Image (tube, rainbow, N blue to C red):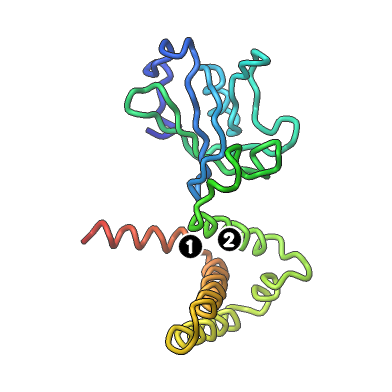
Amino acid sequence: MSDSSIDAGQLDWAKGDGLLPAIVQHWQSGEVLMLGYMNAEALAETQRSGHVTFHSRSKNRLWTKGESSGHVLQLKSIRVDCDADTLLVQADPHGPTCHTGTSSCFGNAVRSPLGFLAELDTLVAQRHADRPEGSYTTSLFEGGIRRMAQKVGEEGVETALAAVAQDDAELLGEAADLIFHLTVVLRARGLSLGDVAGLLAERHAAR
């Protein structure tokens, strides 16, 4: 169930003496970011504030992730497992989750290679909004949709040629260029790689 429909009274608080483990997952990439514990108060505060909040067992108080560092976890959804004794929190991390500087408290090695596409999507969206000077992505956006579309066409042709006449390294390089420029042109039209993935999933489900 989602965060808007969770009834705290239906959760099995007794099993963990008033605490439920809360697994935090990146809402786009699926990367596991951290594990914390919530009591009923922490769950209510998370839903109220939109920032993931835990019960700190060492400090014996509520603790909002990022309250000192600013690296908050913006709530996207909360789901409950089949036994009603574990929470799955999907969040948008504002900065590294771990105090060591890694994106996950389990180390960067847990990140799925495909999960990076979600990070790329987010980065391109940020570039579109901020338009930092000196950024190649900014220059693409400011060049207009026709120039972006031209780049997608060029990279598509180069990828096809690499598939026929070049080695794996060249093919991978051209494919990476194609995906990047496709991400940019999608963003310019108000779309994302997430939208493409959603359509692919719909097509697969309809088979």
Q: CA distance from mark 1 to mark 2?
A: 9 Å
Q: Which residue is mark 2?
A: 120
Q: Residue at x 55, y 37 (%)?
A: 75
Quadrant that contains the C terminus: bottom left
Q: Earlier in the sequence, mark 1 or mark 2?
A: 2
Residue 56 lies left or right of residue 47; in this view the side is right
Farthest residue in the front direction? Answer: 167
Q: Nearer the viewer, residue 28 or 174?
A: 174
Quadrant that contains the N terminus: top left
Q: Residue at x 72, y 65 (%)?
A: 131
Q: Nearer the viewer, residue 50 or 105?
A: 105
User: In the rendered view, would you say 15 is above or below 87?
Assistant: above
Residue 171 lies left or right of residue 5; in this view the side is right
Q: Label 2 is placed on what type of residue?
A: Leu
Q: Label 1 is placed on what type of residue?
A: Leu
The answer to which quarter of the image holds residue 5 is top left
Q: Position of residue 43 (x, y in %)?
A: 52, 23
Farthest residue in the left direction? Answer: 207
Farthest residue in the right direction? Answer: 133
Q: Residue at x 41, y 60 (%)?
A: 197
Residue 117 lies left or right of residue 51; in this view the side is left
Disc 1 + disc 2, Cβ < 8 Å = yes
Circle on res. 193: 1
User: In the rendered view, would you say 48 is above or below 165?
Assistant: above
Looking at the rendered structure, the secondary structure element under dot 1 is: helix
Looking at the rendered structure, the secondary structure element under dot 2 is: helix
